[in-house]
Image (spheres, rainbow, N blue to C red):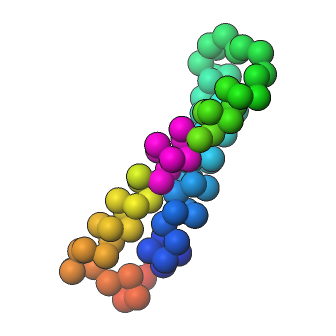
Amino acid sequence: MAVLRERPVLCGTLYGIGVYLFMNLVVLPLSNAGRGAFVLPVVINGLRIHMFGVGLPAALLAARANRSSPGIHAESAEC
């Protein structure tokens, strides 16, 4: 995806937010895990961890892999 190559930081942070929301709104309720009280610092910390520890590294590595693979040309690939 061209936007991932051009803006990996933005894509990574948005991906991290999406992962956090999916985990907290879908996976945890389906697992029947006990839900604690809403504490804003805990939510902010969780978002930061997912943005910078999950999403950003994944996007940077994906953008780097896309740039370094000589056999794959995004412009000629058809979806």
Relative to 38, 9 lies left or right: left
Relative to 48, 38 lies left or right: right
Q: Residue furthest top?
A: 34
Q: Say if 2 sits above or below 19 in the image.
A: below
Residue at image location 77% in from the left, 15% down from the top: 37
Q: Say if 21 sits above or below 68 in the image.
A: above
Residue 23 position, x and y percent, is 60, 33
Q: Residues in magenta?
A: 49-56
Task: Name the image quarter holding residue 34.
Answer: top right
Residue 63 position, x and y percent, is 38, 68
Residue 40 position, x and y percent, is 76, 29
Decide which of 8, 25 is in the foreground and name it.
8
**Magenta highlight on residue 50:** yes
**Magenta highlight on residue 54:** yes
Secondary structure mostly seen in the magenta stretch:
helix
Residue at image location 38% in from the left, 82% down from the top: 74
Task: Name the image quarter holding residue 64.
Answer: bottom left
Q: Is residue 59 visible?
A: yes
Q: Is residue 1 visible?
A: no
